[in-house]
């Protein structure tokens, strides 16, 4: 049986202290893999330092900061593995990460994108929650069902740390779109890759994801975050299979649901005036509240969180 090959693409920018941890987690994998580091114009990272950690690492440095999407795209271009595991410099992988993914795609070979859980950690490296409940189970999702479930908030692949995808599917999808840099750039790519085939969700943690209090997307105002969320839904909408033509939620309902959702986010973050400004008469629509309730129920009942 053919054994899949893997490339871990690590993107970094001015975080040499964290980059070492990410690289070491890639080196510690129980399966062989290619490791690629793309530095997006840092002042504190150089080839000599990276090769002091592992001389076999493929290293590419941009002459100036081009953005996260450009770094991801460059890394995939350099990769030779059939499967790509992305990793941001502030996150790191469990040693069996690739092995978990490899076992899943062996069971479901006609797959182009896989996602697993990650443990959220604070800036100081400590876990933010108690250990995740895991079944180790797999959920296979047919391509024709993916976009509908993404549209109605019943499927979220997660961040780059959680996801692995087929290099060929990524290339056919048109690479990462810089328009979404720092805010839905990953989600936009998952939408595109999913047009190429089926998906797998794995109910097991395979890495650690750092949550920053001052991350880029939180610096955007509430309106910008809502608007970009709407843009993603508008991208997904025409991709929904004709199988769901009689049950597809209208974009107006989704827009109003997102207004309510981001209103609640704003209230939780004590941004009361921007939150109130998002509201409209459409937020009174029962269909928008029904979508909110179903999303809440799904997240409560799903083992994949």
Image (tube, helix red, strand yellow):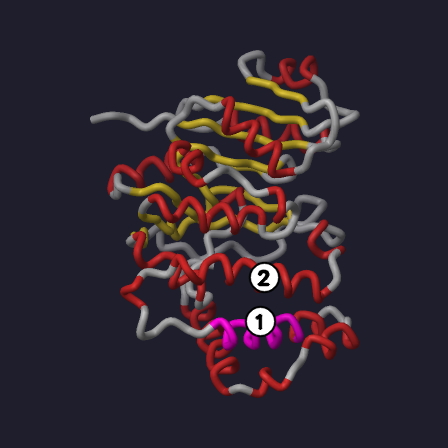
Location of mark 2 (residue): 229
Percent coordinates x, y for residue 81 in the rendering:
41, 25
Relative height, residue 41 to residue 230 (above, below): above
Taking 51 as reference, is 296 left or right? left
- Between residue 115 and residue 99, name the one nearer to us: 115
Q: CA distance from mark 1 to mark 2?
A: 8 Å
Question: Which element type, helix, strand or loop, lies under badge 2?
Answer: helix
Q: Residue at x 56, y 44 (%)?
A: 208
- Between residue 164 and residue 224, name the one nearer to us: 224
Percent coordinates x, y for residue 108 in the rendering:
26, 43
Q: Quadrant of the N terminus?
A: top left
By secondary structure, the bulk of the magenta-drawn segment is best described as helix
Percent coordinates x, y for residue 149 in the rendering:
39, 63
Location of mark 1 (residue): 258
Q: Residue at x 55, y 75 (%)?
A: 257
Relative height, residue 245 to residue 193 (above, below): below
Range of magenta residues = 251-263
Taking 298 as reference, is 279 left or right? right
Question: Which element type, helix, strand or loop, lies under badge 1?
Answer: helix
On residue 283, the disc is: none
Taking 152 as reference, is 179 left or right? right
In primary-sequence order, the first of circles 1 and 2 is: 2
């Amino acid at each position: 049986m053919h054994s899949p090959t893997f490339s871990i693409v690590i993107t970094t920018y001015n975080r040499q202290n964290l980059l070492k941890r990410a690289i070491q987690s890639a080196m510690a994998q129980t399966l062989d893999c290619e490791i690629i580091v793309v530095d997006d114009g840092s002042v504190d990272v150089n080839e000599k330092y990276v090769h002091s950690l592992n001389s076999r690492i493929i290293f590419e440095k941009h002459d100036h900061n081009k953005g996260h999407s450009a770094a991801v795209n460059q890394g995939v271009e350099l990769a030779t593995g059939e499967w790509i595991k992305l990793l941001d410099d502030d996150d790191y992988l469990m040693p069996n990460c690739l092995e978990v993914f490899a076992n899943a795609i062996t069971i479901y070979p006609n797959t182009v994108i896989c996602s697993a859980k990650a443990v959220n950690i604070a800036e100081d490296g400590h876990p933010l929650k108690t250990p995740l409940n895991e079944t180790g189970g797999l959920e296979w999702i047919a391509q024709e069902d993916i976009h509908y479930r993404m549209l109605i908030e019943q499927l979220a692949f997660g961040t780059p740390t959680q996801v692995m995808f087929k290099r060929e599917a990524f290339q056919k999808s048109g690479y990462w779109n810089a328009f979404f840099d720092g805010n839905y750039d990953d989600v936009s790519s998952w939408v595109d890759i999913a047009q190429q085939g089926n998906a797998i969700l794995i109910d097991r943690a395979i890495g650690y994801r750092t949550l920053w209090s001052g991350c880029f997307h939180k610096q955007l105002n509430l309106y910008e975050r809502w608007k970009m969320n709407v843009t993603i839904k508008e991208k997904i909408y025409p991709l929904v299979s004709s199988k769901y033509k009689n049950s597809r939620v209208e974009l107006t309902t989704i827009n109003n649901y997102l207004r309510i959702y981001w209103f609640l986010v704003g209230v939780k973050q004590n941004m009361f005036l921007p939150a109130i400004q998002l509201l409209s008469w459409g937020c009174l629509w029962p269909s928008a509240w029904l979508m909110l309730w179903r999303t809440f129920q799904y997240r409560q009942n799903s083992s994949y969180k």
